[in-house]
Amino acid sequence: MFAVRVAASSPPPPPSAAKMMMSSSHLAPAPPPPPSSSLCSPDARPLLCTRTPSRLLQRRRRWRSSNLSRSMTRRTELERARPALTVRARDGGAASGEVETAVVERPRPSSFQVSRGRPTPLGATARDGGVNFSVYASNAASATLCLISLADLNESRLTEEISLDPMINRTGDVWHVFLKGDFADVLYGYKFDGKFSPEEGHRYDATRILVDPYAKAVISRGEYGILGPEGDCWPQMACRVPSDGDEFDWEGDLPLKYHHKDLIIYEMHVRGFTRHDSSKTDFPGTYRGVVEKLDHLKELGVNCIELMPCHEFNELEYFSYNSVLGDYKMNFWGYSTINYFSPMVRYSSAGLNSCGQDAINEFKTLIKETHKRGIEVLMDVVFNHTAEGNENGPVLSFRGIDNSVYYMLAPKGEFYNYSGCGNTLNCNHPAVRQFIVDCLRYWVTEMHVDGFRFDLASILTRSSSLWDADNVFGKPIGEDLLTTGTPLSSPPLIDMISNDPILRGVKLIAEAWDTGGLYQVGTFPHWGIWSEWNGKYRDVVRQFIKGTDGFSGAFAESLCGSPNLYQAGGRRPCNSVNFVCAHDGFTLADLVSYNDKHNLANGEDSNDGENHNNSWNCGQEGEFAGISVKRLRKRQMRNFFVCLMVSQGIPMIYMGDEYGHTKGGNNNSYCHDNYINYFRWDKKEESASDFYRFCSLVTKFRHECESLGLSDFPTAERLQWHGHLPGKPDWSETSRFVAYTMVDSVKREIYIAFNASHLPVTVVLPERPGYRWEPLVDTSKPAPFDFLSNDIPEREVAVKQYAQFLDSDLYPMLSYSSIILMLSPDTSA
Amino acid sequence: MFAVRVAASSPPPPPSAAKMMMSSSHLAPAPPPPPSSSLCSPDARPLLCTRTPSRLLQRRRRWRSSNLSRSMTRRTELERARPALTVRARDGGAASGEVETAVVERPRPSSFQVSRGRPTPLGATARDGGVNFSVYASNAASATLCLISLADLNESRLTEEISLDPMINRTGDVWHVFLKGDFADVLYGYKFDGKFSPEEGHRYDATRILVDPYAKAVISRGEYGILGPEGDCWPQMACRVPSDGDEFDWEGDLPLKYHHKDLIIYEMHVRGFTRHDSSKTDFPGTYRGVVEKLDHLKELGVNCIELMPCHEFNELEYFSYNSVLGDYKMNFWGYSTINYFSPMVRYSSAGLNSCGQDAINEFKTLIKETHKRGIEVLMDVVFNHTAEGNENGPVLSFRGIDNSVYYMLAPKGEFYNYSGCGNTLNCNHPAVRQFIVDCLRYWVTEMHVDGFRFDLASILTRSSSLWDADNVFGKPIGEDLLTTGTPLSSPPLIDMISNDPILRGVKLIAEAWDTGGLYQVGTFPHWGIWSEWNGKYRDVVRQFIKGTDGFSGAFAESLCGSPNLYQAGGRRPCNSVNFVCAHDGFTLADLVSYNDKHNLANGEDSNDGENHNNSWNCGQEGEFAGISVKRLRKRQMRNFFVCLMVSQGIPMIYMGDEYGHTKGGNNNSYCHDNYINYFRWDKKEESASDFYRFCSLVTKFRHECESLGLSDFPTAERLQWHGHLPGKPDWSETSRFVAYTMVDSVKREIYIAFNASHLPVTVVLPERPGYRWEPLVDTSKPAPFDFLSNDIPEREVAVKQYAQFLDSDLYPMLSYSSIILMLSPDTSA
């Protein structure tokens, strides 16, 4: 158990809530340890940190591990059960009348006017001067709406219960009730009673107060990283009750509707982006902080940001002392959703103000302001599993509402673990798929997001476990029954999303694999509109650029938008999201600085994280290396960036790569709320005349060139392959050279060459009578000559240095370098 | 064209609107003919009766005709295009300022406060002091919300147009706008512009004002059968705008939730039920009329009514003079839906009062009052086609909104005609299936109906035509593309309906065939919960009872709930809706009075209607027959009714059969708004001591017997087959005798025998020591001895007449008769 481990290793304890309120920064060294007994509350209730079993953490470590295929989660350590909320009569004194069980047989007469309510829409809806509550729970025998005032929540008290009559307040599988009354500072949750019979798939527990899956904000702890009132990592949660006054002034915000082919995506983390002191933002680590720094993105030239998870999650999920770094492990990334409709409240500078409405509005402001700058917003959504983990995980919402519906279960009730995180959302169950579509619609229509990146999307293509529902033609036709988890050729959920009238036109991007061994890059069921994180692009480009034999052909295909993957299915280059680095794996700087992962800081002896990184340290391992190694690394970073920006398809940059952010070789930094994951604004400033400048220029160059964002795969009229000699490409096993010319309606023609060999080469350029090739990019040159922008004072001189080569249609390339040349009229002729 | 035909045959013209307002009854002989020119309005606009081409009427005639399989509708006569609504400035005079085209370039500034609106929910929704309008139209280039005051609608004027901006008022494929202002007596519709390119599937016409598919009431003509203001059968329609004050007092009405096995269904027609003068109702032919007569249903013992179509349709669809009967043909049955959310306004005594809200409330009152009497309400829903017919049909709603989405189209835009009515709703298209589910949810949650009977439900299992949407894996994988209309093993629509959380528990009954040759009785994709109209039961029972060789085994299976059809798929007897007669085909009285259909009154030389009726006239054709023939007919009617009520499964009675209603041998009476289809309350009174009494008693007997509504198929412990000798059933080809005993927890044991032979037989009953068999039912006896109810004064005497047989465990049966005997303790022993 965690408490024992804490005592054994004697770390500094976590900052208490009271202390942290005074000092909002906990980047400072941990405060001196108070007596360890303070970790438990005075009434001897245990410290309720849910320690996710070690196995559950593997998802962010071995994201393509095949030995997890279809494995069930194993029972590991038993989590200590969380005590039920204390129920106290509303007017009861604080010291008396306390009851230790949440089950109150006969609640007092309601202070609300209660009527039958309606089953639609699901969730809580302000209407007709009251609020309609509606929740799906097909296997529950009874349901109780729990009302909790903000004050009572802080005191772990339940304010009022309204039990629902199955005859009156239930339509089909939906429970509903309508309340009129004073909802000021009132939150809600539900209790459900029913079977606790894990082997049948049911895990009802009438003492739990559960979060409505359709809650629009989840209220518990208001400040990021701060423990709950009694040192609890998982204090009771409750849901915001909507009100008529929730309108937000969008100032006419409308979707930008960029064509996919014109996108340049920037994958970023809300907190990490401005949490570092060097951001000098007024609201570091929040949605507002991001808004303060949007100009950076504009400057970099990206026109789309992809936010790592912003659905409500618990950053204290893995909360434990990290003896390596001397701080606490967190769920920093947030791939562990508690509620899919709620923006992460603790990413908001407003905290719990107005019961979460301010947080919602802060998220909306982020969207609105981003749109104002011509940048779209995609959300990384984690519909493959929830924060409830395996059978030892906490009961927060789905598990207590309808375990056998929301989770993919084996015949004896075990949790399938295709996500590597202990459970698998039963995505293709009729109720769950409707839930997911409702959720996506909400983010599009209410929150104005422009699209989604689906984490481990292959799980969304797996058949659901229909616990005891009949199959279409009944039980006995066994051969028609699909095994739970079988990949479906036409998954109903993907069908629904793809064909939803309201979702029509939003960006849909699949991370087309899961940890159950399913790898669907190029084969994800796409309905013609889904894009994919092109993991094969990443692998091929890394191999080729670092100089591995045998990849020239594959590299050429990658440059063309991977027609090998996408052309046969009728898709286009823009269905490929190209990336070299993402949150998973090495950063760009680490990719060229480390041969091996260095994950000790994760506290698992470097057993976590990907082992096959296709990385190359350029001669020496780690940050501290000789000057020539460092020079080569810079070249390689430029090569990768050039490759990304000239490739057909949608390029994606990972936050921080534009200035060469390092995680010190950690390729699985999910748990670090510290410098490892923080964007370093000071480093970016340093890089302003170097790599950052280069990236910005190449990014803008891509936008300028018509031929670099084609709507279809390039044809021979458009693209000509070259080798060391023009028109003579070398596709042999040992080739490390790929070059081509592209006809461009804006730029006339472009020559692009990648020399991934350890040897320099002088290439012969294709002759273009009446024109000559002008240098633009050469990754082997030091800044600012790596990109010969017009504003370099010495530009003319620099250009002249290679004039004699270019006059003869030649260009001398260094080893591991790439170039871009432009065709321009030969004025000397 | 109709006008020409009218002139040629010189019939009495249809009653004009003005005349009919004075004389509400048009059962009286048609008024003397006015000059035929009055059929056209003074401004020479043509009389706008859409004459559905003869081919389109075949659906109600040849419902199982195989030669229609996958046939397209053929172009027949071209319908004259309907003129566009006249647009007049709101304050323009009636005589001046009239513009003959509906396209107004710059409408005046709106008198409403207009804002962006939301895409969900679809339809018009009262909210936040205004109304949100939302409509799906994926292929439209522009959309205009049309507001029409009730006064302007009567004058064919458009009051105001609000054109929607595709950038602002469109989210995905959904157009939306929010209006605040005075909506008193304001109706709405839409205009869409886009391609008119039938070969691509698009049929946009910006001059048409269209009905919102989600309209809650459709307003045009208010009184049934009365032509529009200018003699128009299809005057302009508009939709009700909802308001906050639409609440209805349900008085706590809750679903009855009867188990399927306990149902006895009564298929009825709202107008036909009380339209006849003999009903003596205050509101004949309306929902209120039905309420006035609910006690009859209670008395008959049914606990569920199935209403023939009550969705808005146009009873004047086939309006034409019928020279055979001297009246006008109507679409009386109503299998031709204009709008699926709107109750048929002209079935309401309130007509257009409060823009349709009173009609909605009248429908709700019908449901509420029916529930109060312990009777559930099922709706017959026609989701297989719409009233828009084929390419020559009117453009009312779907066709002008998104033709290629709503209709199943062949590659060149032709309409598939699996319905036999000119078009086929594209049910499995993602947008259409959501539409259907939304609609069903509405009727359940808002209207409190208890379930649905799906007309030609097999069409709902056919694959959609995805006009130019990509298939899941793109175009080139041709082998994966399903042909439009292919029956699907797991149709998405049926999946959605079957697994919808809100529809969970409502009754779902499929008419499991279509006119495209698909016949799925026993094989409809049922998800364990669908019941079927058991057409095979009807056929087998008719054959056996009329004395056809070779049906004894099949008849025995029919009595058991058709395990041959339903057991293998995991279903139960209650998944079989058993019926002998329904609206399609002969009535029960006609079934025993006619060998052949007599459909001359339909005006198609008796070419319409089913030819294989398995009927028998008992010796003489027609109503006028000798006394012995009439006696045999009565016996046969009793035999059928006994069979229906002792069969496992859900028995369904067709309205009027309980008193022996005759349609004079017409087996396809869809077009008659007259005595043919009217329930004859006078005849029912006459029958009170005869067949009606018998039916009521047998129906009540079924309710009393535990063994007649089993939840599963009877086993050998429960049921024992007999022949002329006990325990010796005769399943030979020539057997016309089936008998069995059923153990019954209430009635001890029942003996049931059917002698369908032309010869009498004295059967030996199974010995039950200590007990003797007591007579209850003998269909060969004259009333009241056919059912020996306890209230018959002569009961004791009657029982004694057969005592000598029963003392010896014998019973003498007449030819074509059936008996029910009860086991009782032998007090004489």
Image: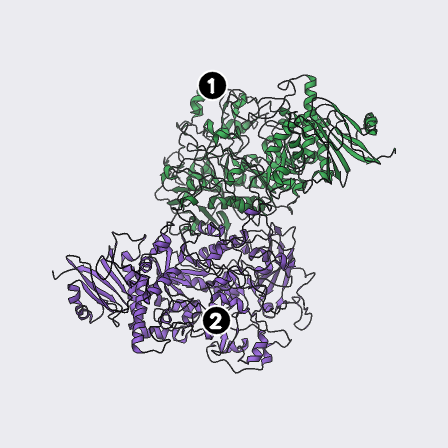
Chain colours: A purple, B green
Residue type beneath disc 2: Asn
Disc 2 vs disc 1: which is toward the camera?
A: 2
Where, by quadrant of the figure, is residue A122 drawn? bottom right
The percent coordinates of residue B313 (x first, y second) are 51, 35
Residue A82 versus residue A628: which sits nearer the camera? Answer: A628
- Quadrant of the snapshot with the N terminus of chain B: top left
| Left or right: B694 as drawn, with respect to B65 | right
- Residue extending furthest toward the front: A733
Residue type beneath disc 1: Ser
Residue A650 versus residue B732: which sits nearer the camera? Answer: B732
Label 1: state its secondary structure.
loop
User: Which class describes the residues within 10 Å of circle 1: few (<14), some (14-19), or many (20+)?
Assistant: few
Residue A154: mark: none
Residue B265 versus residue A286: which sits nearer the camera? Answer: B265
The percent coordinates of residue A351 (x first, y second) are 50, 68
The percent coordinates of residue B661 (x first, y second) are 64, 26
Q: Which residue is mark 2?
A: A607
Residue lying at 45% horizontally and 46% vertically, measured from the top left: B135
| Left or right: B692 as drawn, with respect to B215 | right
Q: Is residue B377 above or below residue B620?
A: below
Q: Provide the chain ID for the residue under circle 1.
A: B
Q: Is residue B726 above or below residue B216?
A: above
The percent coordinates of residue A826 (x first, y second) are 15, 60
- Quadrant of the snapshot with the C terminus of chain B: top right
Residue lying at 37% horizontally and 39% vertically, measured from the top left: B200
- Residue extending furthest toward the top: B626
Residue B10: mark: 1
Is residue B203 among what the camera can see?
no
Mark 2 and mark 1: Cα distance apart in space? 95 Å
